[in-house]
Image (cartoon, grey):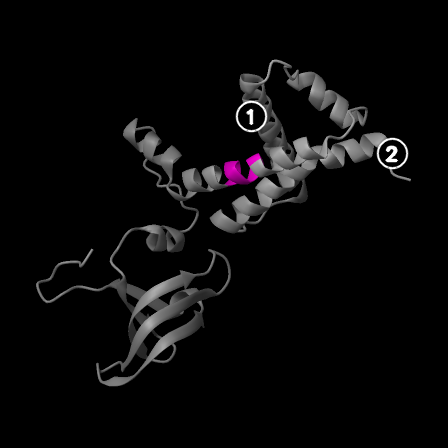
Amino acid sequence: MISASVMGIVLLMIPGIVTNKIVKKLVGDYEEETWESLVSIFTYSIINYTIFGLIYNLFNDNKLELSKMLTQLAEGSLVTDLKQLALVTLLGIIIAYIIALVSNKKYINRFGQFLKVTKRYGEEDVWNRFHNTNFNDWMIVRDHKLELYYSCIINTFSDNTGLRELILLEVMVYNSRGDFLYETPVMYIGRETNELTIEIFVDEEGENDG
């Protein structure tokens, strides 16, 4: 039978598990050791409960003592309030989107660049940085494996590990001599790192459309 303390820890972790899953979905499922994942979940849970406690105390006369609440919950001595658990989990979803926004927009690194603390943009992989940069929609994707190139819009790109996968839209396919072959509304392509080159589309005046 599951002890009250174990059940309390599981309940404590639920908001953090939800936050962690959403952050990985939005930012990218990067590799983590098991202990790192547990630390992230625990940290997110504490953040969620802390912010919930602060918000709750702003609007209620019956104040929550956060440290006491977390201790009782972890020990299994706190009677579970499912409504409160649901609210903390919902708050965790909102926090996950905020964390993903800060991570994807590289606000921490941009602030560091502003302070001249770092020159790093913050991407673990230049592949991600390229796709997250606001270029114009149209790109030239050169497929060195098939000796073709595609004039297209890149709709979706894979994470920075393994095969380089792309979903392309409004694709016009050309051979290496520049002869038009065919067009298709959607194309999936998966290649090794050295089998693709992506170029920014340049208009006739020599300027980027973006």
Residue most toward the left?
205
Q: Position of residue 61 (x, y in %)?
A: 60, 13
Task: Report the Cα–Cα distance between label 1 and label 2.
Answer: 28 Å
Q: Quadrant of residue 52?
A: top right
Q: Which residue lies at the image location 38% right of the left edge and 55% below the top edge?
A: 127
Residue 15: say if magenta.
Answer: no
Picture residue at 61% right of the left edge, 31% below the top:
43
Question: Who comes first in sequence, dot 1 or dot 2?
Answer: 2
Specify start and end residues of the magenta stretch as a single range.
91-96
- In the image, taking residue 140 as reference, residue 209 lies left or right, namely left
Q: Which residue is mark 2?
A: 3
Quarter the N terminus occupies = top right
Q: Residue at x 82, y 30 (%)?
A: 5
**Residue in the image at 17% along x and 58% along y:** 208
Residue behind mark 1? 51
Q: How many marks?
A: 2
Q: Is residue 94 magenta?
A: yes
